[in-house]
């Protein structure tokens, strides 16, 4: 099976330091939402955790996300998110690496599933341990080799992975609802059973 380096398949960008922009920005301007590592949790963007800053204009040097982009959090646990329509046009900070598929040979949903595999996560964790630093670099991502499957196989793997993620969300909600029910029963001091 053929493998290629990600640097051959994707365009990677590292976000800008938000603190520098905040220092230069005055209190007037356009409010913009920023993806920070705290906003990336369990392969999702948590909207409540997005940082909001004011910038002078929308044509700022900050990079924006596009639907189908993949954002990798550069700090452990190296969560990866696939940008959907809802999160298109957001800026991201320097602790995030944005990847845009630039090759016709690669499907973004397959890349998303691949980067979320235990094998890749372990590989990134081991790199960090060997460097004795916390964040991974753009080069670390670009040097990952990805198996090149047929487009049909890639689409299938991507679709299966997205379905599994959706099932996980549903199960988590069901479990939380059951826990809430149990807590309600306990708070009513067993009155439920009377």
Image (cartoon, rainbow, N blue to C red):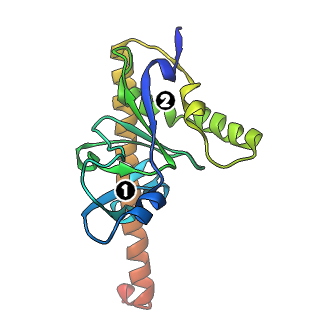
The disc label shown at residue 48, or none: none
| Position of residue 189 in the picture relative to residue 63 (left or right) | right
* Position of 182 relative to 68 (above/below): below
Give the structural element (helix, strand or loop) at label 1.
strand
| Residue wearing tag 2 | 114
Residue found at x 65% / y 37%: 122
Looking at the image, residue 137 sits to the left or right of residue 69; the answer is right
CA gap between label 2 and label 1 equals: 25 Å
Count of labels shown? 2
Residue for point 36% across, 37% down:
162
Front-lying residue, 149 or 172 = 149
- Quadrant location of the C terminus in the rendered image: bottom left
- Between 113 and 24, the one lying in front of the other is 24
Q: Quadrant of residue 39?
A: bottom left
Front position among marks 2 and 1: 1
The spot of residue 105 in percent (x, y) is 37, 14
Measured as percent of width and height from the top left, residue 101 is found at: 37, 26
Residue occupying image coordinates x 33% and y 60%: 47
Circle 1 crowding by C-alpha within 10 Å: few under 14, some 14–19, many from 20: many
Comparing 68 with 102, the one in front is 102
Residue at mark 1: 34
Residue 9 lies, in percent from the top left, at 44, 20
Q: Where is residue 42 in the image (x, y as percent from the top left)?
A: 47, 51
- How packed mark 2 is, by other alpha carbons closer than 10 Å (few <14, some 14-19, many 20 or more), is some
């Amino acid at each position: 099976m053929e493998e290629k380096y990600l640097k051959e398949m994707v365009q990677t960008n590292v976000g800008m330091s938000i603190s520098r922009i905040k220092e230069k920005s005055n209190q007037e301007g356009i409010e913009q939402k920023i993806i920070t590592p705290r906003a990336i949790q369990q392969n999702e963007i948590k909207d409540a955790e997005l940082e909001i800053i004011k910038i002078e204009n929308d044509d700022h040097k900050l990079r924006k996300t596009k639907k189908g982009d993949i954002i990798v959090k550069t700090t452990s646990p190296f969560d990866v998110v696939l940008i959907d329509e809802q999160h298109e046009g957001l800026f991201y900070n320097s602790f995030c690496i944005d990847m845009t598929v630039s090759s016709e040979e690669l499907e973004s949903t397959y890349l998303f599933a691949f980067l979320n595999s235990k094998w890749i996560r372990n590989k990134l964790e081991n790199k960090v341990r060997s460097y004795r630093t916390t964040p991974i670099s753009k080069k670390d991502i670009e040097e990952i080799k990805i198996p090149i499957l047929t487009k049909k196989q890639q689409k299938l793997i991507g679709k299966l992975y997205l379905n599994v993620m959706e099932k996980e969300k549903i199960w988590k909600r069901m479990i939380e609802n059951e826990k809430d029910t149990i807590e309600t029963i306990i708070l009513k001091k067993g009155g439920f059973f009377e």
